[in-house]
Structure formats: structure tokens, C-alpha cells
Amino acid sequence: MLAMIRLLGTLHDDAGSVAVAGLTGRDTGDYPEYAEAQLRDETGLLDGVSPIGTGHILSRLWSKPSITVTGIDAPTVLNASNTLSPEISVKISARVAPGQTAADAFEALEKHLHEHAPFGAHVSITDVDRGNAFLVDTSGWGVAEGLQALEEGWGAPAQQVGAGGSIPFIADLAEVFPEAQILVTGVEDPDTRAHSPNESQHLGVFHRSILSEALLLARLDSRS
């Protein structure tokens, strides 16, 4: 257990930034204003808890790699005893930033884990699932039609915001169909808190999203 704790601790530096050599970001430096106070309000960050990482807050969310431990197989607190564990298993999820392939990112992470294993502990990596990053192109007519449909569905001009993270098959889809215009939609409002324990969905927002999608399909059907 101690070896695993020490190994996982090497994945981030003291500020919470990813500390794996070879994992790269795509920091353009061109970000809108977004204060830490707004982040705290929108995420429900408790007093005294600091956001992790360094640099512009939006660069951390949009254009830098991230690593998260999403699961650990170890004795439960209920069944804990002062007994050595022969092995500890964890599941690690790494977000790949645009500009780097998933294969290169995995190679860097794999190298790091083997080189930083403490006390001569043996590291075995299995069940690897790779998904490339996707950077959306908002210059096509498809996005313009989508924005217009959203404006009609909500009765107000649509606003564009950035989001870090990709659904892996989208990059595969773009590779197979390079001429396709890909528009990915989802239903969220400021209090959705996606991927959180208290994730929710506002039914009014859901209704308008369905309406906007129907309007988009109608607009696409009417194109010559």
C-alpha cells in the first residue's frame, strides 16, 4: 500500500499540476476573463480549498493534460487489518491535450510509472484504452446552423464557451470522415455539476435542448 501511495504521489507536483515528463499541453494564451471567485461559485469549492494547477484557470480546464485516480482496489476500512497486501490495483484516467496523440501520452505515463516505482516495487499495466483528443473547428456552416437553432430554441443569442475533455470516438470519427463537420451537444446548466455526486439536469433546459435539436434537423433538411 505504501509503495502505491508513494507512486501515485509522483503524478502531480505540490501545486497539483501534472508532473509526468512528456505529457504536453496546448496553451495558446488567448483566454477570456474568468476569475477564481467565479470558479468557486460555479463549482461549489469550499472555503480554504484551493484550485489545483498553475497558470490561467481556463488553460487548466481546456488545454492542459490531467491525471485522475478513478478507482482503487484495496482492503476496505471496514475490513482493514494490520496485514501486508500482496498487491494493490488502481485505475488511472489521463486526459490528453490537443496536439498530442494518445499513444505518445500513454508512453510517457507508462515510462513515468515504471521509473518512479519506490522500493523496487513491481508495476504491471493492463487494460489500456487509448482515446485521442479532439479540437473542434467552429468555422464551418454546420456550427453556424447549430448556433442559429440554439438561438431560436432559447430566444436569445447563443454563447460559445470552452470545455476541456473529449469523447474519444469523436477523434476517430473525424479521422475516418475528415470532411465532416462535427457538432457535439449536451444538456447542462450552471448547476449541473457534471460528473459530480450531485449531478443534475434542469428539465426546462432539457426541453429547450430538444427543441433546438429539432430546429437544427429542420434547418439541415431545408439546405439545398
Image (cartoon, rainbow, N blue to C red):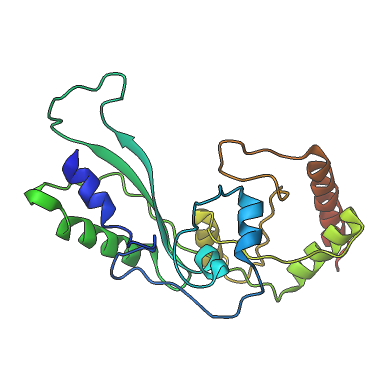
Residue 168, image x, y percentages: 49, 55
Query: Could you tell me which residue is drawn at 54 percent across and 63 percent down?
Result: 61
Residue 8, image x, y percentages: 27, 50
Front in this rendered view, residue 5 or 210: 5
Q: Residue furthest top?
A: 79
Quadrant hosting residue 85 = top left
Query: Could you tell me which residue is drawn at 68 percent across and 72 percent down?
Result: 138
Residue 198, image x, y percentages: 61, 36
| Residue 71 appearing in the image | yes
| Residue 125 appearing in the image | no
Residue 164, image x, y percentages: 55, 61
- Check the picture and name the quadrant holding the C terminus: bottom right
Direction from residue 89 to residue 94 in the image, left or right: right
Q: Residue furthest left?
A: 120
Q: In the image, is residue 55 above or below residue 67?
A: below
Query: Could you tell me which residue is drawn at 24 percent across and 22 percent down?
Result: 80
